Amino acid sequence: MTLSNPKELKSVIERHGFSFSKSLGQNFLIDQSILDKIVEGAGIDKSWGVLEIGPGAGTLTRELANTAGKVVAVEIDKSLENLLAETLADFENAEVVFADIMKTDIRALLAEKFRNMPVAVVANLPYYITTPIIMTFLENEIPVKSLTVMVQKEVAERMAASPGGKDYGALSAAVSFYTKPKIVCSAEPHCFLPQPKVASTVITLSVLDKPSVEVSDKDFMFKIIKSAFGQRRKTLLNALSKSPYVALEKSSVSAALESLGLDSSIRGEKLSLSDFAQLSDILKPRGIEPHKL
Ligand code: SAM
């Protein structure tokens, strides 16, 4: 069975009377070279476990199960149950859990299914949940080694952006705090059935053993970062002193910038993550949390 062959995929879909749901982002991959690149990007072998999110017809699941020791795939759509039972029948090391990943206790699932195996996450999901899911893994420090995800091209560019450019923002800062990002490949609309409207990019985020910079209070630093990028056209000084996330006096922000040798007219996108960490450590003792946040 070669599910990357559109004829074979259509035939299995028809046999099971499956119909695609737009709202669940059901665009299934039909390009073998992209499947190969995703598996390679995940950096797995037989000693690894894979948590796949959104297996669809099982096309990628089969490839992952050929390479990894064990694959657990979380799929929200119960109408794929019989279809997946057929497409994964030959793979004793692949298991499907029917659940909404947004409502799943992922930490408990990993502990139950993988015990001490290193785990890679692989996901080709609807765009609106991909970034929240990535942030759930990173912010909660869920123990996985990497996340290989298909995202909208622009989102991948923002994730991998360096300070100074137009793509650099709060997402880039969070990604570089927790991971080392690497673009794997792009996927044009014709690589999917049915074709989506926009092009996608596969990116691997290799989770760092410890965050890339030291900071005394990472939550406070991310409030500073969110404030800086929430109002990009403002100077950093104005964005921070009028922030809806932290209460800071203009004079203390000004003094902090000066002590770091940063110009008072600087904008947030010019600061590196290490600048934000230092700024946060200086401002933290003076920050008063606003009441209604
Ligand atoms: N991995 C398959 C492939 O590449 O051909 C299918 C990818 S398709 C873009 C997205 C899959 O994610 C669909 O099967 C969809 O039902 C599933 N999905 C959507 N939302 C989900 C959620 N919240 N939890 C788990 N799976 C979800």
Image: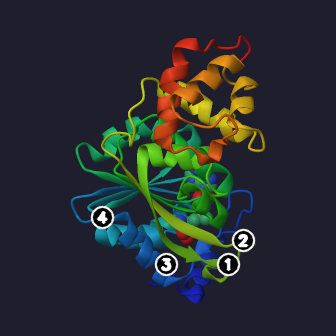
Q: Amino acid at mark 4?
A: Ile
Residue underneath mark 3: 34
> Which label number is shown at residue 189?
1
Label 1 vs 3, first from the N-terminus: 3
Whether residue 42 is visible here, answered yes or no, is: yes
CA gap, disc 1 and disc 2: 6 Å
Q: Are marks 1 and 3 in contact (CB under 8 Å)?
A: no
Quadrant including the N terminus: bottom left
Residue 273 horizontal/vertical position (percent): 49, 42
Mark 2, secondary structure of its residue: loop
In this orientation, does residue 86 appear? no
- Nearest to N terminus: mark 1 or mark 2: 1
In primary-sequence order, the first of circles 3 and 4 is 3
What is the C-alpha distance between the residues marked 2 and 4? 29 Å
What separation in Å lies between label 3 and label 2 (alpha carbons)? Answer: 16 Å
Up-down: is 54 above or below 66? Answer: above
Sequence-first disc among 3 and 2:
3
User: Relative to 180, is 156 on the left or the right?
Assistant: right
To which quarter of the image does residue 52 belong? bottom left
- Neighbour tally class for label 1: few under 14, some 14-19, many 20 plus, Cα within 10 Å: some
Up the image or down, 293 lies above or below 52; here it is above
Tell me what residue is drawn at x 75 percent, y 30 percent: 238
**In this orientation, which residue lies closer to the viewer: 211 or 197?**
211
Specify which label sits upstream in the sequence, 1 or 4: 4
Q: Residue at x 72, y 24 (%)?
A: 241
Judge whether 203 appears above or below 223 on screen: below
Amino acid beneath label 1: Pro
Q: Which residue is mark 2?
A: 198
Q: With 206 as the anchor, is 258 left or right in this view?
A: right
Determine whether the residue tagged by mark 4 lies in a helix, strand or loop: loop
Q: Which residue in the protein does label 4 denote?
A: 44
